[in-house]
Amino acid sequence: MGRRYSSAAAFSMAGALAACDGPQSALRTGGVDAAQLAQLFWVMLAGAVVLWLLVNGLFLYVTRIKTRSLSRKWAEALIIGGGIVFPTIVLGALLAYGLTMMPDQRAPGDGLRVRITGEQWWWRVEYWPEGAETPVISANELRLPAGLRSEIELTSAEVIHSFWVPGLGGKTDMFPGRPTRMSLEPTEPGSYRGQCAEFCGASHALMAMQAVVMEPAAFDAWLAKEAAPASLPEGPGRDLFFREGCGACHSLRGTEAAGAVGPDLTHLGGRSSLAAGILPMTSEALARWIFDPASIKPEAHMPAYSHLSDAELASLAGWLEQLQ
Amino acid sequence: MKTVLKTTVALAGLALLAGLAVVFLGLFNTSARNGHLPLVAPVLHTTFRNSVELRAPPPSEVPELDEARAALGARHYDTACKICHGAPGQPRSATIRAMVPQPPPIAEAVSDWAPNELGWIVREGVKMSGMPGWPSTRDDEVWALVAFLTRVPGMAAEDYARLTAPPPVEGPEGVTYCAGCHGAEGVSGNPHIPRLDILSADYIALSLRSYAEGERQSGIMAQAVSLVPEQALADYVAHFAASPAGEAPEAPADPGGGLVERGRALALATDTSRKVPACSACHGPSREARSDAPRLAGQYAPYLDRQLRLWRNGLRGGGPRANIMREAAARLTDEDIAALAAFYASSGDQTAQ
């Protein structure tokens, strides 16, 4: 084996290992559902290793160690036993083991429902606490209480998307006009990354989200704050927001800005990321985004506001960042 | 066989030489004083007739040629076409009559064409005749002119004079020209001609610049702007912007079917299931329209309908925010546009809050 091959092998191994950690790993589990799936993965992997050793051991045995031919009776027993009976039993057992997990993955929730709608290319997120008549509307960020099972209702506006936060659970497709559901019971407070897992257009790869798991008390406090109307700081940014007609597409709850085409901005500055998980929530990133969204997210529906001066962009972005 | 071939080649060579001599030695007399050689005029004219008949749009594409369209067409005719074709009661000048071919007097020119054919001729022009094509890529405006042209045969001189009379205006010198179509106080009284009294100075100035630079398409307005000295534009803008918002034209009868209500839901975006931005965020009527965004409340429905279609179809520009309006209109259906036009036309008396 040449040096080139060994370094390539080492490189791909490193790549594979890197996927075992980080905010978007299915193996760094932060909840009951992901842990169950990780366990399924490890069981499958262990089984595969055993089978691989068995098959290759047998191969080595008949080609190198005992090369004489088998009697017809033994050969038939080996083919029927090893080729039909053994795989049927093993695969059947694994299937049964896997299928028993499915009801758990969509067990009914403890009260909170979160309705997520896939848009091109962002996530509309509505929180429906138990008994609520109107939702708390947010976007591009999913917050869940630790230790409680939450219902996740999924739908889509125009094309098929797929909701997947690997650190918290499995993935479920989102269809226009056909709601789907799953549930999640996170256990470890922390930050996880989700990603649209079904090709949905030019910016599919740029459709991510932050999922934040919080202690229940902290979550309740956050939700109460999120439900409050916008508190608007004074300043030129505020005038720009209304002058430029941003409210035609975006809502600031409690103001005349009530658009529902784009993400709700009532508490924009309180989110951990911008543009569906791909930019940091800073005034510089906000200014870049407003100047020309399609340069960051190809084919984004938000039009460019490149007619604004740098100073105007800066004050608008700075003001938006203050919408905590 | 060889002889035939040689003869053909020789003849072709001679023809080529003769052609080159005509072009480069100036042998063809381009003088227009004595008209065409015999037979040339009938051949050209027959070619023209058949070309129009082949290419004219089907009669079903001709919109209703109502009086209001004809009134707009008459004003445009007076400023753009009369110089060559004369008008009822107004003969062509001696110089124009010396053209080859001679532009026919208008009653004679339109007499044996159907409206769809007239529309094609007005839009495309006629090559090698001096008749120009429509100076804009928009193809819906020619019908105003056609509406006028269909009324020309038999039109009395007084009727033409009435249609094109300058209105009495108190304002800067020359603004009479604008007022001819838009009304002395910016209220045209014609649903195909926008009201200016409800618009801001910024927006009127922006529109005129857009017409002059071709960002906003209109053969009628391109012609109008090209006739006004640039330094006078600011005065005219100021005149119309300062006009008190006139009496709202009589609100059009609700065409029924809840059209106005549908338009309101769209304009204010109360129906959140539709991916249509709230028009009201920039255009009112619930809040003051931004100074460089036109106020729409009280504007004429047919004008709004036309403009929204141009935006939706990507044919309208004008101003630094044109890309935003194009995106906003991109998902409107024909029914949405009719509903929005009906809503804004009928919400005339709401003053900004």
Image: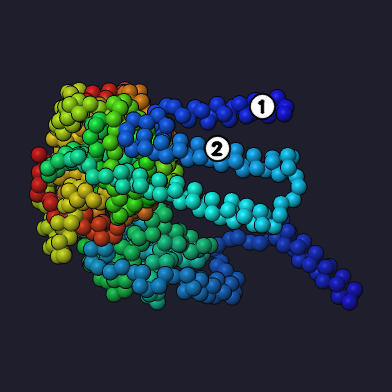
In which quadrant of the rendered image does the N terminus of chain B lie? bottom right
Amino acid of disc 2: Val
Q: Nearer the viewer, residue B331 or B67?
A: B331
- Residue A286 coordinates in the image, percent (x, y): 33, 28
Q: Residue at x 39, y 38 (%)?
A: A37
Q: Nearer the viewer, residue A321 or A185?
A: A185
Q: Which mark is residue A6?
A: 1
Q: Residue at x 14, y 41 (%)?
A: A130
Tell me the mark number nearer the camera, choosing from 1 and 2: 2
Q: Nearer the viewer, residue A308 or B130?
A: A308
* Residue under pointer 2: A49
Secondary element at image label 1: helix
Decide which of tag 1 and tag 2 comes sooner along the chain: 1
In the picture, residue A148 is in which quadrant? top left
Task: Assess disc 2: are there few (<14), some (14-19) or many (≥20) residues with their C-alpha within 10 Å of its C-alpha.
Answer: few
Vertically, is B102 above or below A309?
below
Amino acid of disc 1: Ser
Q: Is residue B288 visible?
A: no
- Residue B283 coordinates in the image, percent (x, y): 21, 43
Q: Residue at x 16, y 36 (%)?
A: A253
Check chain identity for marks 1 and 2: say if they share one: yes
In which quadrant of the rendered image does the C terminus of chain B lie? top left
- Residue B13 coordinates in the image, percent (x, y): 80, 64
